[in-house]
Image: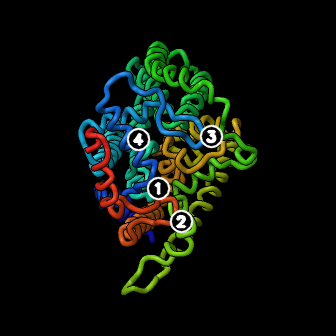
Amino acid sequence: MDALKRWVNQYYFQIVLFCLVLGTILRFLWPEDMEWKSEELWMFEEAHRVAQGGFPLPPGGIMSSVGIPNPGMSLWCFALIAKFTTTPIGMVQGIMFLNVVVLWCFFGFIVWQIPRMQQSIWLWGLAIASVNPIAIIFSRKIWIPDLLAPFCLLCFLGHSFRQKFWGAFLWGCFSLCSGQIHMSGLFLTVGLTLWTIWHDWRDKQLKKIAWSGWFLGSVVASVPLIYWLIDAHSQLQRSASSIVGLLVPKFYMQWLTTAIGVNLSISLKQTFWSDFLQEPRFLGMSTYLMIPVHAFLLCIGLWSLYQMWQNCRISRRNQKIEQATIPNSSIKDYIQALGFGLGGIFTITATDVIPHYVPITFPFPFLWLANIHHRRPHILLLIVLMQLWISITFLQFIHDNDGCENCDYGRTYRSNKVEFQSYLKTTPEIFR
């Protein structure tokens, strides 16, 4: 085991690069296997209408799960992609491309900005994010959460340099813009701002923030938000709050299951239990290997929670953050910002957090997991391999079955293509 740890430590950078390449391939693989339901069709059609129609831009987008239209910025982004493509495949490849670019930009940020002695945790977290099945799913759809990663990157980049005018501007602008892509971003804006004020006041750094840049960025991003609020104000009394959201910490449950990559039931529903766990198949026979793989990752999740609790005890007893599990202060800060800031706002407002709220935290659930096990690189390698296996098996399962008709994933675009091409013949010229 010691020999394995030494080998992983010696070659971890090459392992991370290999994971990034694999993550790139898996995101681009079989684009015709994308989900193709009424939401994707609506977004494709409306994006082309906006792309061809010019101004004024519509204030709202697709209907949200809480019964009010999403802000229009998400639709505008899809319309921008529609300017360069006329097919659903072209549009989803644009989404895939954006998410792959974000992965490599995070890699560039780590290599460029993080001190070499602290890079391993960040890089292992990025390796997990590259092959994580949930992260891959949210990179392959014509769907609003799949647009969040670039905004998360720019918000994180700006916040990291918030003592500079340009950094604070990016933070203020793109945190608020993320809330106009998906409304979970509004929770991020409030939670991150409140946590930053408390954290930097405690460290006597509050006055060093370039608040003029943050204010200007927020004002710029508020213009389309006000445009949406004027249109949607009569419906804003509705909400997704529930007693479940207050009593059950669903944000933290979604964070954990996303980090370890075991919640594919969000896409497969009952089919996950009845069919997917029998995968992969060998010579037509079920191997059921997905069961021990998921069991291993569930044990990793429980072990991670125990380790986090132990490290908190050590931190309190010694009154030294350095002796806790988080040796890198910036990772610690962002995990606390999302855990206490974003998670706290979700919990206080009793919001019923569902899985597609979690992409607003990208890539920090994976950095959290890497940080917990940073002294056990062989465990991190196993986590990466198990999640990679699940991702490959999932994509193969969808490809072999043309989707999953009786679950949330639905039929693939490939199986619907003939029907869609017939439909296009009856639509206006802008959709052809």
For the residues marked 3 and 1, what is the alpha-carbon distance in whole angstroms?
A: 19 Å
Instruction: Answer few, some or many: residues within 10 Å of disc 4's Cα (few below 14, many 20 plus, some between 14 and 19).
Output: many
- Indicate the amino acid at tag 4: Leu
One can see residue 11 in this view: no
Residue at numbered disc 4: 147
Mark 3 secondary-structure assignment: helix
One can see residue 383 in this view: yes
Q: Which of marks 1 and 2 is nearer the N terminus?
A: 1
Q: Which of marks 4 and 2 is nearer the N terminus?
A: 4
Residue at numbered disc 3: 343
Residue at numbered disc 1: 134
For the residues marked 4 and 3, what is the alpha-carbon distance in whole angstroms?
A: 21 Å
Q: Which of marks 4 and 3 is nearer the N terminus?
A: 4
- Name the foreground residue: 91 vs 187: 91
Nearer to us of marks 4 and 2 is 4
Q: Is residue 3 left or right of residue 349?
A: left
Q: Position of residue 226 (x, y in %)?
A: 51, 20
Residue at numbered disc 2: 297
Mark 2 secondary-structure assignment: helix
Q: Where is residue 64 in the image (x, y as percent from the top left)?
A: 55, 40
- Indicate the amino acid at tag 1: Ile
- Indicate the amino acid at tag 3: Gly
Labels 4 and 3 touching (C-beta < 8 A): no
What residue lies at 62% left-to-right and 53% top-to-bottom? 253
Mark 4 secondary-structure assignment: helix
In the displayed image of the protein, which residue is found farthest to the front?
426
Mark 1 secondary-structure assignment: helix
Name the image quarter holding the N terminus: bottom left
What colouring style does the render use?
rainbow
